[in-house]
Image (spheres, grey):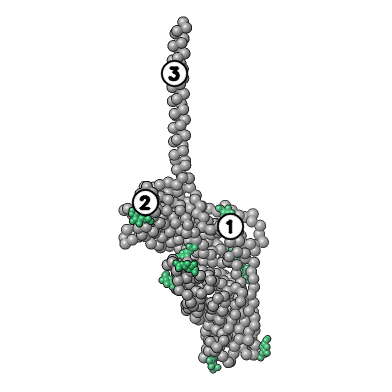
Amino acid sequence: MATRSPWPRPLSLPCCCLLLLALGGPGFFQSHAVEVNVKDLSNNTCIYAEWMMSFLIKYETNSSEYKNATLKPSTNVTHDGSTCGNNTHAPLLAIQFGAGHSWSINFTKTNETYQGNIISFTYNTNDAVFKDAKTKGPITIVVKDPMHPVQLNTVYKCHHLDSIEVANVSLFFWNVTLQAFVQNGTVSKNDSTCEADKSTVAPTTVANLTTAPITTASSPLPTTTSKPVEKPLIGNYSLKDGDKICLLATMGLQLNVSQEKPVLININPKTTNVTGSCGNTSAILRLNDSNKRFIDFTFAVKNTSANTQRFYLKEVNITLISSINGSEPLNAGNNNLSIWDTFLGSSYMCQKEQTVLVTEDLQIHTFDLRIQPFKVQDNKYSKAEECFADSDLNFLIPIAVGVALGFLIILVFISYVIGRRKSRTGYQSV
Ligand SMILES: *[C@@H]1O[C@H](CO)[C@@H](O)[C@H](O)[C@H]1NC(C)=O
Ligand SMILES: *[C@@H]1O[C@H](CO)[C@@H](O)[C@H](O)[C@H]1NC(C)=O
Ligand SMILES: *[C@@H]1O[C@H](CO)[C@@H](O)[C@H](O)[C@H]1NC(C)=O
Ligand SMILES: *[C@@H]1O[C@H](CO)[C@@H](O)[C@H](O)[C@H]1NC(C)=O
Ligand SMILES: *[C@@H]1O[C@H](CO)[C@@H](O)[C@H](O)[C@H]1NC(C)=O
Ligand SMILES: *[C@@H]1O[C@H](CO)[C@@H](O)[C@H](O)[C@H]1NC(C)=O
Ligand SMILES: *[C@@H]1O[C@H](CO)[C@@H](O)[C@H](O)[C@H]1NC(C)=O
Ligand SMILES: *[C@@H]1O[C@H](CO)[C@@H](O)[C@H](O)[C@H]1NC(C)=O
Ligand SMILES: *[C@@H]1O[C@H](CO)[C@@H](O)[C@H](O)[C@H]1NC(C)=O
Ligand SMILES: *[C@@H]1O[C@H](CO)[C@@H](O)[C@H](O)[C@H]1NC(C)=O
Ligand SMILES: *[C@@H]1O[C@H](CO)[C@@H](O)[C@H](O)[C@H]1NC(C)=O
C-alpha cells in the first residue's frame, strides 16, 4: 500500500468491480476477461475497461537455453494504484496478478480524442512458471501504446487480436472494451470500432486470407460447407551467409491447429519472410508469415556409429500470434524430433505429403519438400536422399518387375530342362 502512495488523495480507487468472467474455452489457453471500473471519490466512473490479455515471455534457463512462458491475468487480479488522475497526473489503469506480476497503462487526451500512452509490464521470474529461470526477480518493460486516438466520449471496441512485442515479451490483447475520460460518470453509448474489426467483416479481405474456411464453435451454421482445403503453394526459401546461399528449402506448408476444432491453415510463401541462421552443426530456418505466424525449424548434425555425419530435423517451434479468429495466441514446440534424417552434404526430398507432429493439437503437413540446411554448394541443392514414401514407388516397382522377370526366366529354364528330359526319354523309348 505504502508504495502506491504517489496516487494518494484526490480521486482514487474505491472501485470494487473487478469482474472475472471465466470463459468456456477449454485447455491450456483458457482465459479470463478482466474488467476494471476506476471511480473517483464521488464514485463516478472515469475509466471503464474490459479486455482479454496474455503475455508470452522468453526467458533464459539455468542451462542457458531459452524457453517461453505464458502469463495471463486470471483469478486474484487486483487494481491497486488505478486512478482517475487530475490536471497534472494522467489517469492510470493498473492491475496486479499472479505471483508478483503487474501491468498498467496511462491515458492522454486532446480536445477531441483520447489514447493510451505508456504501457508498463512487470513480470516476476520468481513465479513457478519460470522455475528454471537463470535470474530471479522482477523485470519491467515499458512501451508506448500503439493504439490510435479514439474520439472522446466513445467506447473503444476491438475484438481483433493485437500484439505488442518488446524485449523478450509479447503482449496480446483482444476483445477490448475501453473508455478513458468517461464524462459525468456514465460510460458512453457510442462505440468506436477499431479498423481491424471493420475489415474482418469485409468480404474482400476474407477472400485474401490464406487460411482455410473457419467454422467457429459459436457459428450457428452446420459444417456442411467444410470444403476440402487446397494444397498449399510451394515456396522456395533460402538463407545466405555473405553472398552465398547456406540453406535451401522448398516446401508447401499447412498447419493443422486444433484449438476448439481442427483448422487447416495454408502458409502463403508469397507473403512469408525468411530469417534464421546457418552453422556447421546447427541451422535454423524461421518463416514469418504476414499473418503473424512464426515457424522455426532447427536442424542438427549427428555422428553415426559408421563414422559418417547426418543431419536431421531436431526441433520445430511454432508461434501463432493471430492464429484463428478470436482464439488465443499459441506457442508450441517439439524439440525431440529426429526426422528428415539425411547424409550431411545431401539434400532431403519428400514429394509426398508428410506430417510433423509438433504437439497433440498442432501438426505441420509438408508438400513437395526438399531441404538442405548444411553444406550447400554453388547455391544449389546437392543430390537428394528421398523419403521412404517417395522411394517406395521408385524402387518397389523395379523390384517387382525384376522379380517377375526372374520368375519368367526360371520358368523358361525349367520348361526347357523338362522339355529336354522328355525328348531324351522319348528318344530312348523309341
Ligand atoms: C494529482 O494527482 C497526483 C497523484 O495522484 C498528486 O500527487 C497531485 O498532488 C495531484 N494534484 C492536484 C493538483 O490535485
Ligand atoms: C462510494 O461507494 C462505496 C461503495 O459502493 C461507498 O462505501 C462509499 O460511501 C461511496 N462514496 C460516495 C462518496 O458516495
Ligand atoms: C532477452 O533475450 C536476450 C536474447 O534474445 C537475452 O540476452 C536477454 O538476457 C533476455 N533478457 C531477459 C531479461 O531475459
Ligand atoms: C521456441 O523458441 C523460443 C526461442 O525462439 C524458445 O524460447 C522456446 O523455448 C521454444 N519453445 C519450445 C516449446 O521449444
Ligand atoms: C535448474 O533449475 C531447476 C529448477 O529449479 C533445477 O531442478 C535444476 O537442477 C537446475 N539446473 C541447473 C543446471 O542448475
Ligand atoms: C455532462 O454533464 C454536463 C453538465 O451537466 C453536460 O453539459 C454534458 O453534456 C454531460 N456530458 C455527457 C457526455 O453526458
Ligand atoms: C523454386 O525453385 C525451383 C528451382 O530453382 C523452380 O523450378 C521453381 O519454379 C521455384 N518455385 C517457385 C514457387 O518459385
Ligand atoms: C488435424 O488434427 C486433428 C487432431 O489431431 C486430426 O483429428 C485431424 O485428422 C487432422 N486433420 C488433417 C487433415 O490431418
Ligand atoms: C562428431 O565427430 C566430429 C569429429 O569426427 C567431432 O568433432 C564432433 O564433436 C562430433 N559431434 C558430435 C555431436 O558428437
Ligand atoms: C471473427 O470474430 C468476430 C467477432 O468475434 C466475428 O464477428 C466474425 O464473424 C468472426 N469471423 C470468422 C471468420 O469466424
Ligand atoms: C470475445 O467477446 C465475445 C463477447 O463480447 C465473446 O463471445 C467471445 O467468446 C470473446 N472471445 C474470446 C476469444 O474470448
Q: Is residue 58 above or below residue 209?
A: below
Element type at mark 3: helix
- Is residue 381 at all visible to an observer of this figure? no
Q: Quadrant of residue 281?
A: bottom left
What residue sits right under mark 2 in the picture?
A: 309
In the depicted view, which residue is nearer to us: 320 or 55?
55
- Counting other residues with Cα less than 10 Å from the Cα at mark 3, is it few (<14), some (14-19), or many (20 or more)? few
At a point 56% along the width and 63% down the height, the residue shown is 324
Q: Is residue 335 above or below residue 199?
A: above
The residues tagged by marks 1 and 3 sit, at their Cα atoms, a distance apart of 64 Å
- The nearer-to-camera label among 1 and 3 is 3
Q: Earlier in the sequence, mark 1 or mark 3?
A: 1
Of the numbered discs in the image, which one, if any, rests on residue 118? none
At a point 51% along the width and 66% down the height, the residue shown is 321
List x then y, in percent, for residue 398: 44, 36
List x then y, in percent, for residue 270: 45, 59
Identify the amino acid type marked 3: Val
Q: Is residue 19 above or below residue 265?
A: below
Element type at mark 2: strand
At a point 63% along the width and 86% down the height, the residue shown is 14
Q: From the Cβ of disc 1, is ligand 8 less than 8 Å away?
A: yes
- Is residue 189 at all visible to an observer of this figure? yes
The residues tagged by marks 1 and 2 sit, at their Cα atoms, a distance apart of 38 Å
Q: Earlier in the sequence, mark 1 or mark 2?
A: 1
List x then y, in percent, for residue 363: 53, 56
